[in-house]
Amino acid sequence: MIEVPITVSYLTTKPDYADFKVAAAKALIKKSETNILRVTGCVLIFSALILRAFFSGSFLQNVIYTIMAIVGVIVGAFFDFIARYTVRARAFTYYEANKEKFIAQITEFDEEKITFKTDRYSASIPYALFYKAYEDGRVFIIYTGIDEMKFIPKRAMNEQECEQIHNILSTKLQEKYQQEGAR
């Protein structure tokens, strides 16, 4: 049973903002793109081994083959980690430089709309007008347009509220709702 309205009140913290940016980056990357990177990494490693076995000669060639293998491992196995770390570091830097822009917010989920409120504005948007929504383990991202996003950190609500919001978004947005891992 979904109990509405559900009201979530929060002040964005540095970890919240970083979690949002990481989730937004994950939402952009397609599974096929990740698979292509993994295959590319494996091809680089395999090519380096083959080249080393059959064309090993000078010290410079061996260094190049070793670098190829290392790049293959980085691209194939650690791309997700490196991308997440980079996005998180940039988000921390941005937050520190602009922390005065992050103000308290209230988001209210109702039967027919979501209302976003701050001390500067209030907007009630019907579910039909949302571009899409994305959920991962730490945040809900509501896309009001292609590159226009609002996010709600899950730490600002209890588990039952998270489940209710998940149910509302998946019911109201259907195919426009995406959850981490489900592509």
Image (cartoon, rainbow, N blue to C red):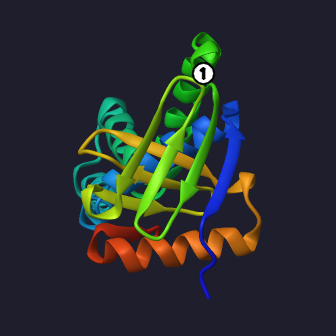
- Give x and y (percent) for residue 102: 61, 24
Q: Is residue 61 left or right of residue 85?
A: left
- Give x and y (percent) for residue 21: 49, 40
State the residue position of label 1.
Answer: 95
Q: Which of 57 and 22 is in front in this view?
A: 22
Q: Can residue 82 be seen in this view?
A: no
Q: Is residue 135 left or right of residue 118?
A: left
Q: Is residue 20 above or below residue 136?
A: above
- Give x and y (percent) for residue 173: 33, 71
Quarter occupied by the N terminus: bottom right
Quarter occupied by the C terminus: bottom left
Kindly state the secondary structure of the residue where label 1 is placed: helix
- Give x and y (percent) for residue 95: 60, 21
Q: Which amino acid does label 1 sit on?
A: Tyr
Q: Is residue 91 visible?
A: yes
- Residue drawn 47% across and 67% down? 180
- Residue drawn 63% across and 25% down? 103
Q: Which of 79 and 109 is in front in this view?
A: 109
Q: Which residue lies furthest to the bottom in this view?
A: 1
Q: Is residue 100 left or right of residue 62?
A: right
